[in-house]
Amino acid sequence: MNWGDLVVKWVHVISIVTGVGLTLFQYLVLLPVLRRVQGVPEDLVKAIQRRAGMVIGIAWVLIWVTGIYNLVVVVPTVKPNYHLVLGAKILLVLVLFFISTALSHPSLAFEGIQRNRARWVALAAWLGIVIIALSATLNMMRLKGVALKELPAAQVQQLPSGSP
Ligand code: HEM
Protein backbone atom coordinates (compact mmCIF):
# COMPACT_ATOMS: atom_id res chain seq x y z
CA MET A 1 0.00 0.00 0.00
CA ASN A 2 1.25 3.49 -0.84
CA TRP A 3 0.87 5.50 2.41
CA GLY A 4 1.24 8.86 0.62
CA ASP A 5 -1.75 8.10 -1.63
CA LEU A 6 -3.74 6.95 1.40
CA VAL A 7 -3.05 10.13 3.38
CA VAL A 8 -4.05 12.25 0.36
CA LYS A 9 -7.30 10.25 0.08
CA TRP A 10 -8.01 10.85 3.78
CA VAL A 11 -7.50 14.60 3.35
CA HIS A 12 -9.69 14.57 0.17
CA VAL A 13 -12.54 12.79 1.94
CA ILE A 14 -12.28 14.79 5.22
CA SER A 15 -12.29 18.10 3.28
CA ILE A 16 -15.37 16.91 1.38
CA VAL A 17 -17.15 15.89 4.58
CA THR A 18 -16.40 19.40 5.92
CA GLY A 19 -17.44 21.36 2.79
CA VAL A 20 -20.51 19.32 1.82
CA GLY A 21 -21.42 18.85 5.50
CA LEU A 22 -21.50 22.60 6.13
CA THR A 23 -23.60 23.10 2.98
CA LEU A 24 -26.05 20.40 4.12
CA PHE A 25 -26.18 22.01 7.58
CA GLN A 26 -27.25 25.29 5.98
CA TYR A 27 -29.77 23.55 3.68
CA LEU A 28 -31.34 21.25 6.26
CA VAL A 29 -30.95 23.16 9.56
CA LEU A 30 -29.90 26.82 9.45
CA LEU A 31 -32.07 28.18 6.63
CA PRO A 32 -35.29 26.31 7.63
CA VAL A 33 -34.85 27.50 11.27
CA LEU A 34 -34.24 31.10 10.16
CA ARG A 35 -37.44 30.95 8.08
CA ARG A 36 -39.46 29.95 11.17
CA VAL A 37 -37.87 31.91 14.04
CA GLN A 38 -38.49 35.66 14.30
CA GLY A 39 -36.05 38.23 15.65
CA VAL A 40 -32.73 36.46 15.07
CA PRO A 41 -30.11 39.25 14.93
CA GLU A 42 -28.90 39.79 11.35
CA ASP A 43 -25.32 40.19 12.64
CA LEU A 44 -25.42 36.67 14.05
CA VAL A 45 -26.71 35.19 10.79
CA LYS A 46 -24.06 37.09 8.79
CA ALA A 47 -21.29 35.94 11.18
CA ILE A 48 -22.39 32.28 10.89
CA GLN A 49 -22.49 32.51 7.10
CA ARG A 50 -19.10 34.29 6.96
CA ARG A 51 -17.51 31.67 9.21
CA ALA A 52 -19.05 28.79 7.21
CA GLY A 53 -17.85 30.42 3.96
CA MET A 54 -14.31 30.71 5.33
CA VAL A 55 -14.14 27.06 6.41
CA ILE A 56 -15.67 25.92 3.09
CA GLY A 57 -13.03 28.04 1.28
CA ILE A 58 -10.20 26.26 3.14
CA ALA A 59 -11.86 22.90 2.39
CA TRP A 60 -11.94 23.80 -1.33
CA VAL A 61 -8.19 24.50 -1.42
CA LEU A 62 -7.56 21.03 0.05
CA ILE A 63 -10.17 19.41 -2.23
CA TRP A 64 -8.52 20.85 -5.38
CA VAL A 65 -4.96 19.92 -4.36
CA THR A 66 -5.85 16.37 -3.26
CA GLY A 67 -8.36 15.86 -6.12
CA ILE A 68 -5.72 16.70 -8.73
CA TYR A 69 -3.21 14.45 -6.95
CA ASN A 70 -5.77 11.58 -7.01
CA LEU A 71 -6.34 12.26 -10.70
CA VAL A 72 -2.63 12.07 -11.56
CA VAL A 73 -2.25 8.79 -9.62
CA VAL A 74 -5.36 7.09 -11.02
CA VAL A 75 -5.65 8.22 -14.65
CA PRO A 76 -2.72 6.18 -16.13
CA THR A 77 -4.28 2.96 -14.78
CA VAL A 78 -7.88 3.29 -16.06
CA LYS A 79 -9.95 2.73 -19.22
CA PRO A 80 -12.23 5.20 -21.13
CA ASN A 81 -15.36 4.14 -19.17
CA TYR A 82 -13.71 5.60 -16.04
CA HIS A 83 -12.81 8.83 -17.89
CA LEU A 84 -16.47 9.27 -18.84
CA VAL A 85 -17.66 9.19 -15.22
CA LEU A 86 -14.65 11.24 -14.06
CA GLY A 87 -15.42 13.88 -16.75
CA ALA A 88 -19.02 14.13 -15.48
CA LYS A 89 -17.73 14.45 -11.90
CA ILE A 90 -15.28 17.24 -12.75
CA LEU A 91 -17.93 19.13 -14.72
CA LEU A 92 -20.27 19.05 -11.69
CA VAL A 93 -17.37 19.94 -9.36
CA LEU A 94 -16.76 23.11 -11.43
CA VAL A 95 -20.45 24.09 -11.15
CA LEU A 96 -20.41 23.41 -7.39
CA PHE A 97 -17.17 25.39 -6.98
CA PHE A 98 -18.74 28.37 -8.76
CA ILE A 99 -21.93 28.29 -6.64
CA SER A 100 -19.93 27.80 -3.43
CA THR A 101 -17.65 30.75 -4.24
CA ALA A 102 -20.60 32.95 -5.26
CA LEU A 103 -22.38 32.21 -1.96
CA SER A 104 -19.50 33.39 0.23
CA HIS A 105 -17.50 35.91 -1.84
CA PRO A 106 -18.30 39.56 -0.97
CA SER A 107 -18.19 40.66 -4.65
CA LEU A 108 -21.20 42.65 -5.95
CA ALA A 109 -21.23 40.36 -9.00
CA PHE A 110 -22.69 37.60 -6.78
CA GLU A 111 -25.38 39.76 -5.14
CA GLY A 112 -28.20 38.06 -7.10
CA ILE A 113 -27.12 34.59 -5.99
CA GLN A 114 -26.72 35.71 -2.36
CA ARG A 115 -30.21 37.26 -2.37
CA ASN A 116 -31.63 33.84 -3.37
CA ARG A 117 -29.37 32.00 -0.91
CA ALA A 118 -31.89 29.24 -0.04
CA ARG A 119 -32.30 28.15 -3.68
CA TRP A 120 -28.55 28.13 -4.40
CA VAL A 121 -27.62 26.40 -1.13
CA ALA A 122 -30.19 23.68 -2.01
CA LEU A 123 -28.62 23.25 -5.46
CA ALA A 124 -25.11 23.12 -3.94
CA ALA A 125 -26.21 20.47 -1.40
CA TRP A 126 -27.74 18.23 -4.11
CA LEU A 127 -24.70 18.70 -6.36
CA GLY A 128 -22.46 17.64 -3.45
CA ILE A 129 -24.55 14.47 -2.98
CA VAL A 130 -24.45 13.59 -6.70
CA ILE A 131 -20.66 14.19 -6.84
CA ILE A 132 -20.11 11.93 -3.83
CA ALA A 133 -22.23 9.21 -5.52
CA LEU A 134 -20.18 9.55 -8.73
CA SER A 135 -16.93 9.39 -6.72
CA ALA A 136 -18.00 6.20 -4.96
CA THR A 137 -18.91 4.77 -8.40
CA LEU A 138 -15.42 5.64 -9.66
CA ASN A 139 -13.88 3.89 -6.68
CA MET A 140 -16.05 0.79 -7.20
CA MET A 141 -15.22 0.69 -10.94
CA ARG A 142 -11.54 0.37 -10.03
CA LEU A 143 -12.13 -1.97 -7.12
CA LYS A 144 -14.15 -4.39 -9.24
CA GLY A 145 -11.65 -4.10 -12.09
CA VAL A 146 -14.21 -2.96 -14.74
CA ALA A 147 -12.28 0.28 -15.32
CA LEU A 148 -8.73 -1.01 -14.96
CA LYS A 149 -6.35 -1.37 -17.92
CA GLU A 150 -4.61 -4.24 -16.08
CA LEU A 151 -6.14 -6.38 -13.33
CA PRO A 152 -4.13 -6.75 -10.11
CA ALA A 153 -2.39 -10.17 -9.85
CA ALA A 154 -4.79 -11.30 -7.07
CA GLN A 155 -7.83 -10.80 -9.34
CA VAL A 156 -6.15 -12.44 -12.38
CA GLN A 157 -5.64 -15.63 -10.30
CA GLN A 158 -9.40 -15.75 -9.55
CA LEU A 159 -10.39 -15.70 -13.27
CA PRO A 160 -11.71 -19.03 -14.66
CA SER A 161 -9.11 -20.76 -16.84
CA GLY A 162 -9.43 -19.92 -20.55
CA SER A 163 -10.55 -16.29 -19.91
CA PRO A 164 -8.71 -13.71 -22.02
C1 HEM B 1 -11.49 19.33 -7.44
C2 HEM B 1 -11.64 18.41 -8.28
C3 HEM B 1 -11.65 16.96 -7.91
C4 HEM B 1 -10.92 15.98 -8.53
C5 HEM B 1 -9.94 16.18 -9.67
C6 HEM B 1 -11.24 14.73 -7.86
C7 HEM B 1 -10.71 13.51 -8.20
C8 HEM B 1 -10.89 12.35 -7.50
C9 HEM B 1 -10.34 11.05 -7.84
C10 HEM B 1 -9.50 10.75 -9.08
C11 HEM B 1 -10.73 10.20 -6.87
C12 HEM B 1 -10.37 8.71 -6.79
C13 HEM B 1 -11.57 7.88 -7.24
C14 HEM B 1 -11.20 6.42 -7.25
O1 HEM B 1 -10.91 5.87 -6.18
O2 HEM B 1 -11.22 5.82 -8.34
C15 HEM B 1 -11.53 10.92 -5.92
C16 HEM B 1 -12.13 10.37 -4.78
C17 HEM B 1 -13.18 10.93 -4.15
N1 HEM B 1 -13.72 12.18 -4.40
FE1 HEM B 1 -12.89 13.60 -5.60
N2 HEM B 1 -12.16 14.97 -6.87
C18 HEM B 1 -12.46 16.31 -6.88
C19 HEM B 1 -13.38 16.94 -6.08
C20 HEM B 1 -14.32 16.28 -5.31
C21 HEM B 1 -15.51 16.84 -4.71
C22 HEM B 1 -15.93 18.32 -4.82
C23 HEM B 1 -16.16 15.85 -4.07
C24 HEM B 1 -17.46 15.86 -3.29
C25 HEM B 1 -18.37 16.79 -3.35
C26 HEM B 1 -15.38 14.65 -4.21
C27 HEM B 1 -15.67 13.44 -3.63
C28 HEM B 1 -14.83 12.35 -3.60
C29 HEM B 1 -14.99 11.18 -2.76
C30 HEM B 1 -16.11 10.96 -1.73
C31 HEM B 1 -13.96 10.30 -3.10
C32 HEM B 1 -13.68 8.94 -2.47
C33 HEM B 1 -14.45 7.87 -3.22
C34 HEM B 1 -14.17 6.52 -2.59
O3 HEM B 1 -13.02 6.19 -2.34
O4 HEM B 1 -15.14 5.78 -2.36
N3 HEM B 1 -14.27 14.95 -4.99
N4 HEM B 1 -11.63 12.23 -6.31
Image (spheres, rainbow, N blue to C red):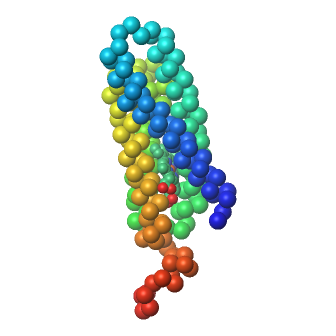
At horizontal 33% and vertical 18% (from top left) the residue drawn is 35
Q: Tell me which corner region of the image, top left, top right, bottom left or bottom right, holds residue 115.
A: top left
Vertical position of residue 52 compared to residue 34: above or below: below
Of residue 46 and residue 91, the one placed in the foreground of this image is 46
Q: Tell me which corner region of the image, top left, top right, bottom left or bottom right, holds residue 28.
A: top left
Residue 104 percent location from the top left of the image: 48, 25
Vertical position of residue 26 compared to residue 61: above or below: above
Q: Quadrant of the C terminus?
A: bottom left
Residue 56 percent location from the top left of the image: 53, 33
Q: Residue furthest bottom?
A: 162
At horizontal 46% and vertical 71% (from top left) the residue drawn is 145
At horizontal 44% and vertical 62% (from top left) the residue drawn is 140
Of residue 42 and residue 103, the one placed in the foreground of this image is 42
Of residue 141 and residue 109, the one placed in the foreground of this image is 141
Residue 4 percent location from the top left of the image: 67, 57
Q: Quadrant of the N terminus?
A: bottom right
Tell me, yes or no, if residue 83 can be seen here.
no
Marks counted in the figure total 0
Vertical position of residue 131 compared to residue 86: above or below: above
Q: Is residue 113 left or right of residue 45?
A: left
Tell me, yes or no, if residue 108 can be seen here.
yes
